[in-house]
Amino acid sequence: MKCAFGKISLKGTFKEQWEYGTGLYGRFLYLQSGSEQALICAFDLAGTFHTEARRFTARVSELTGIPQKSIWFHELQIHAAPGGKELCGEPMDMIISRSAEEVRAMLSRAEECECSACDIHMGTEFTMNREQYVEGLGGVTVWRGLEFDKDGVPYTNDPSVMLLRGYAPKLESLEKGVYFDNAVDEKAYLFVFKNKAGKTLGTLSRFAAHPDVAVLFEHSENPDRLKEYRYDFDWPGYLTGILEREFGGTGMYINGPCADLAVKKDCANKCTYTASAEECRRIAALIGKKMINEFRGRSRPVDTKAVFRTETFEIKLPVKDDFPRSRAEASDYEGRVESAQAALDKALEEGRPAFEIKKLIDERWRKGHFYSMVFSGGGYTDEELASREIPVQVTALRFGGYLFVGVPGESLVDITLWLRGSFTGEKTVPVDQVNGYYDYLATPRSLTLGGYTYWSSFVSRWAIPKLKRELYPLLRSFMK
């Protein structure tokens, strides 16, 4: 087994709107065994159109000789970074050029390696599920404003933080307090690669939670908060720095499915970028300390002679009936928004039950999201919208007895639990947002309950069951 790590700066590749608080980077891990190659590219970016992500993998393959099926374009969903249209065309050309140049250099310096790993049980100490069902209301999502009880369990009885457009229902369930205690991804991983002389080449770490802490100020009451934006690689970037200082080499982080997962962050008095960035560092320090202590006490050698294999699968996901059928239809959304708002206003005026009003709130949010989902989020083409099916890619890598699975878009913890339960248990490492952004991939449950995942998703309720049904035999065959 040979490996090499690499890193590029993203400065200058896109039109910059803000100052830099930290750099933004692309980080690379190259693995080779015999004729098989794998390249994982992890970028401090928000979300790239799948058309551009696939152009990246195709062009980097041409420029380096690494098979396209073996290249992962992974983004960390960094909220303080560019995404969507900002990365189309010339910006992506520059990212491709810099990446290919670095990868070619990595190919020449790849050397025989040894790897040690630690599978770390994180529990719910640092992460939480930000979605919950509220009796008499429906499913809600909370981005910030939660409190924590003596055991660290998040809760709230404040409807103003539940994305209800100002609606404040009087419900017994809210008076008691709503606990946000649904399932999380409790696993973290740390891999340390060294050459035969014992020098650390790099580290690969993985956890699962939204990197949305560097922009906490945007939800504050600070009247000048729009002036606070800085490019920042959020807690994953600070975490890689901690691991680089501890072990040496190049640090690289990959993020697990996190659509409904957030770190347990302190949102109080985060009215500035400086305060938000400090919270990033605090969280990174806690996660880093846990990873390092566990690794120092329990790491074990990885069998680098185990099966090493890569593949990319494509599956088409059905679109919701009300999703636009063309980009022109998505542009003409004002009438639908006005109609949804009128229905909501009428229900509020009539004092309809809270669960009815909640459904109308979701529809109002949803109708207003169509334009941004098509043009700013997923970048869906007219052909895809007309076909009512969106092609997504799932990538797979077998290394050292582990199964790494790259899933599309922002996926819920449901996909992590399904993958681990269906394949190699704790040795299955799901990775989010690989080979393009597709907004939220809502499960049937989240589509039923409502909330942010519901109105930020293009998929029908049959999409994720179809993904699982078609992916299962493909991965089973891949594991033989």
Image (cartoon, helix red, strand yellow):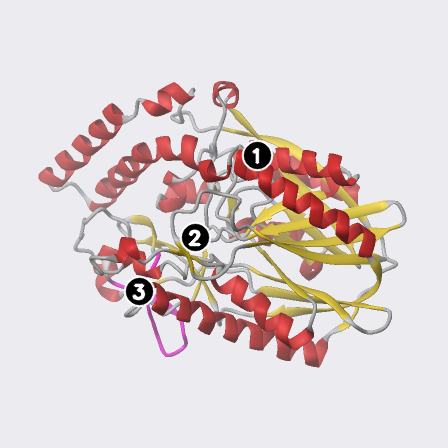
Q: Is residue 227 left or right of residue 324?
A: left
Question: Residue 417, relative to residue 120: is it above or below?
Answer: above
Residue 238: where, in percent of width, then height? 52, 67
What residue is shown with label 3?
Answer: 272
Image quarter hosting the N terminus: bottom right
Q: Is residue 193 within the magenta segment? A: no
Dot 1 alpha-carbon crowd within 10 angstroms: few under 14, some 14 to 19, many 20 or more:
many
Considering the numbered disc 2 on the image, is that residue within a helix, a strand or a loop? loop
Q: Quadrant of residue 346?
A: top left
Residue that numbered label 1 is attached to: 52
Most distant residue in the right direction: 34
What distance separates the C-alpha of mark 1 from that of mark 3? 33 Å
Which residue corresponds to mark 2?
Answer: 79
Q: Position of residue 222 (x, y in %)?
A: 22, 61
Q: Determine whether, in the image, residue 356 is placed left or right of residue 204.
A: left
Where in the figure is residue 417, as x and y percent of width and height? 59, 54
Front residue of 382 and 349: 382
In the displayed structure image, the side of residue 127 where residue 313 appears, left or right = right
Q: Earlier in the sequence, mark 1 or mark 2?
A: 1
User: Does label 3 or label 2 sit earlier along the sequence?
Assistant: 2
Say what amino acid the circle numbered 3 marks: Thr
What is the distance, in whole Å, between disc 3 and disc 2 at their CAs? Answer: 15 Å
The three-letter code of the residue at mark 1 reads: Glu
In the image, residue 37 sits, relative to residue 365, either above or below, namely below
SS majority, magenta: loop
| SS of the residue under disc 1 | helix
Q: Nearer the viewer, mark 3 or mark 2?
A: 3
Residue numbers of the magenta segment: 143-157
Say above or below: 468 vs 205.
above
